[in-house]
Image: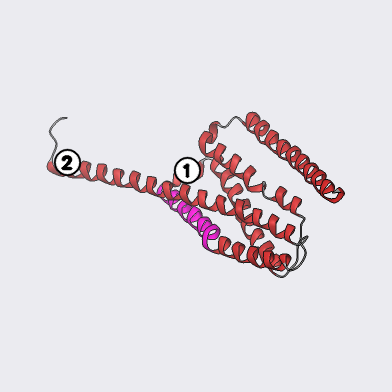
Amino acid sequence: MPDCPESSKVVYTTFIVEDFIGSMTYFWFKSFHIIGMVVWFAGLFYLVRLFVYHAEAEEKPEPARSILKEQYELMEKRLYGIITTPGMVVTVVMAIALLITQPSLLQDMWLHIKLGLVAVLVAYHFYCGRIMRQLATHKVMFTSQQFRSLNEVPTVLLLVIVLLAVFKNNLPINTAIAVTGSFIVGMIVFFQLYALHRQKNAQQVVSQ
């Protein structure tokens, strides 16, 4: 490297240090963004599973019905308030921090699509909160089977979001649509078979 004035060396060193700090900051934000996302999705998956059990508790005789419903209401409230919502907040805040760190990402189409899907997920989150409050007032909107189907909404969103985050602008659209469509069809078939299995078992119990 040729000799250069002392001031140029200082400027060059400062640039390297700032670039390093900026890169490290980005990775810290990204790490907590991923952690928040894992917590958020785990909470959403389990929350709607509790809705399934809550709906099935309506079919139980007293006093089991009241005991189960009270327990599920408490579990749902704690899960939503202590795990799921904080997970959402961390995910969104870290995503905003990432965009502040690298605003050039906003020029990518894949990110626009991802942000749109995240907006749908946020709406789903608050919709689950609404269902939770309605269940607490003994209003069951869906059957347990319908809640099982509802529980797959974040699964589909997670699938597409991860594909976008990994492939970015290189995502093979046709393949992604085929994979997502196959997954949805597979889930529909699975739920139909599971419903038939439960119905068969219930008939066997009655016949005995």
Percent position of residue 159, x then y = 60, 40
Residue 143 in magenta? no
Q: Could you tell me which secondary element the residue under label 2 belongs to?
A: helix
Residue 99 in magenta? yes
Could you tell me which residue is drawn at 67 percent across and 46 percent down? 152
The three-letter code of the residue at mark 2 reads Lys
Could you tell me which residue is drawn at 85 percent across and 47 percent down? 203
> Residue lying furthest front in this view?
208
Q: Earlier in the sequence, mark 2 or mark 1?
A: 2
Q: Could you tell me which secondary element the residue under label 1 belongs to?
A: helix
Between the C-alphas of marks 2 and 1, the distance is: 31 Å
Whether residue 72 sits left or right of residue 163 in the image: it is right
Whether residue 29 sits left or right of residue 130 in the image: it is left
State which mark lies toward you, 2 or 1.
1
> Do tag 2 and tag 1 residues touch (Cβ < 8 Å)?
no
The three-letter code of the residue at mark 1 reads Leu
Could you tell me which residue is drawn at 53 percent across and 36 percent down? 168
Percent position of residue 129, x then y = 64, 62
Question: Does 61 sit above or below residue 107?
Answer: below
Whether residue 33 sits left or right of residue 63 in the image: it is left
The boundaries of the magenta stretch are 82-101
| Colour mapping used in the image | secondary structure
Give the labeled residue for mark 1. Answer: 105
Quarter location, residue 23: top left
Percent position of residue 181, x then y = 70, 35
Quarter location, residue 156: top right
Q: Residues within 10 Å of mark 1 (few under 14, many from 20)?
A: some
Name the mark on residue 9.
2
Percent position of residue 13, x then y = 21, 42
Question: Does 182 sit above or below residue 203?
Answer: above
